[in-house]
Every structure is written in C-alpha cells, then in structure tokens.
Amino acid sequence: MIIFIGNLTAEITAHDLVAVAQLAAGTPVKVYKKPDGNGGLYRFGLVHLNSEKEGSKLIRRLQRTEMHGNSLETREYGHRHTGNERRRLDWRTAPWHEPERRKGERRAPD
C-alpha cells in the first residue's frame, strides 16, 4: 500500500517524514515537488508499506498532524494516468475565461 502525505513545507526531508510518521528504519519514503500553478512548488511524500493494516494505522496516526505550521494531508495514494499529471494543481478553482463549451456549439438554442 502506498500512502500520500501532502502539504509539506520546503524544509521537510524524507528523513524528517520518517521521524514524524514513526516509521521503521528502511521504510521506502520519497519526497516529490510539483509546480502548483502560482509559480511555487507543492511538496508531497509517498510512503511504501507492506500491508493495508500498516497503511490504515499510518493514516489514522497522521490525521490532524502539523509540521512547520502546515496541517498534513494523509490518504491512500491513487495512481493517475500521465495525461492528468500535466494539469495544474488548482485547475478546478482557476477561472475559465472562454465561452461555455455547450453554449458555443452551433446547435445550441439562443
């Protein structure tokens, strides 16, 4: 099971994440950076665990945990297609400046 730990600050390393999550030594942890659409970087970590039971315990343990002033977001990691990875993180909240697609069709009633 892979656990997603999001909303990490710039100074957090994989070693810090292992310490906060109270993981056993040698547990695979990697911290990733992704552009957030505002010129900054969104940082998150992925933790690879052997069983779903360990994953559920980790999610419960890290709920409402804060690191360097940020509240951590913890959930099971969901794999995505590479086509979705090109989107901005805030694409749902970004304003749309084009005409509504359905209103732009030639068969749409006025």
Image: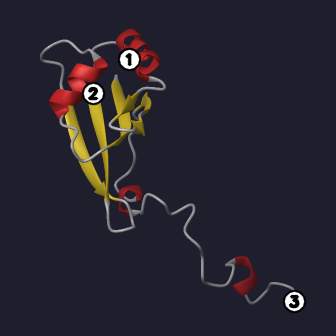
- Mark 1: amino acid: Leu
The quarter of the picture where the C terminus appears is: bottom right
Work out whether mark 3 precedes mark 1 in sequence or the reverse, and give the earlier one: 1
- Mark 3: amino acid: Asp
Q: Quadrant of residue 17?
A: top left
Q: CA distance from mark 3 to mark 1?
A: 54 Å
Q: Are marks 1 and 2 in contact (CB under 8 Å)?
A: yes
Query: Residue 9's spot in the image, x, y percent?
Result: 30, 44
Task: Say which residue label 3 marks.
Answer: 110
2 or 3: mark nearer the eye = 2
Task: Say which residue label 1 marks.
Answer: 58
Question: Which residue is at the far front?
Answer: 69
The quarter of the picture where the N terminus appears is: top left
Task: Say which residue label 2 marks.
Answer: 47
How packed mark 3 is, by other alpha carbons closer than 10 Å (few <14, some 14-19, many 20 or more), is: few
Query: Residue 96's spot in the image, x, y percent?
Result: 60, 76
- Mark 2: amino acid: Val
Looking at the image, residue 5 lies above or below residue 19: below
SS for dot 1? helix
